[in-house]
Image: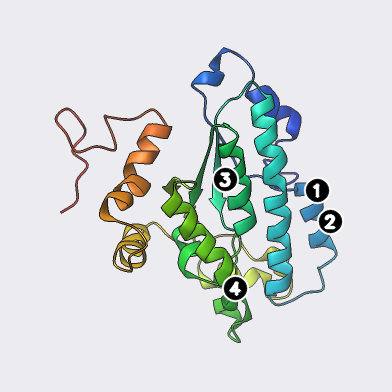
Amino acid sequence: MAYKNAIMADDEVLVNSLRGPWNSVLCLLCMPRMANSCSSFRSNCLRVVSPDPKRILCRGRLKWKAKRPTVRSGWAGAGGPIYIVHMSSKDAVDVITRARSEGQRVFAEVLPGHLVIDESVYSDPDWTRAAAHVMSSPFRTSEHREALWRGLQSGQLHTTATDHCVFCESQKAMGCEDFTRIPNGCGGVEDRMSIFWHHGVNKGRLTPNEFVRVTSTNAAQIFNLFPRKGAVQVGSDADLVV
């Protein structure tokens, strides 16, 4: 679905992956994106040097538009559960909310960066700082940020991940004359938990129990690891940090 001419899977592969006796236990992870449209859009912007937010955000809109048919395809493929990675926009949250209200087994994650960083980073006069934030999905406006928090609060978004993929400044500089050559990715592993606690619990967006569910319990249940993981109880793994 994403990354044409690399690891992209088309709709046929998606549906066939959900057919068969394993669909009741298989949870398909996918990154929906209109890869063909993204590829065409990128080709038309090759003269762009800076990581311009309008162009990056437009690419993001193509991504959320791809989520609707992806979710529908999953349901058509015998109702297998689907796990959507890297949720970053209000529109995408709306797609997930509607699908779940119709009884579809759809789960979705959010990255901590999308909850605290906005599109202004792409307009930074320091090109290296702007390039350092180039990733998929891109960072967006505060409207989308708040929608993601509401999705977590209402239970429509379920987990947090990082999509940790870091590059040093010299590697990002490969795209200084052609933005399509900027390596795609940012860090996140080290600060994931502290960001959720500080901006979630300390600021009243999440309760401590909701923090535990989003960062641990929900993932263990979705991926059939509960109660060995995701719980503090006799018999569970003692994955504790004090």
- Mark 1 vs 4: CB contact within 8 A: no
Question: Residue 77 at x, y = what percent?
Answer: 67, 23
What SS does tag 4 mark?
A: helix
Q: Amino acid at mark 2?
A: Ser
User: How far is mark 1 from mark 2, CA to CA?
Assistant: 6 Å
Residue wearing tag 4: 119
Residue wearing tag 3: 97
Residue 10 seen anywhere in this rendered image of the structure: yes
- Residue drawn at (69%, 67%), measured in percent from left and top? 56
- Mark 4 vs 3: CB contact within 8 A: no
Of the image marks 1 and 3, the number of the one nearer the N terminus: 1
- Mark 4 vs 2: CB contact within 8 A: no
- Mark 1 vs 2: CB contact within 8 A: yes
Q: How is the image coloured?
A: rainbow
Q: Amino acid at mark 1?
A: Asn
In the image, residue 224 sits, relative to residue 5, either above or below, namely above
Residue wearing tag 1: 36
Residue wearing tag 2: 40
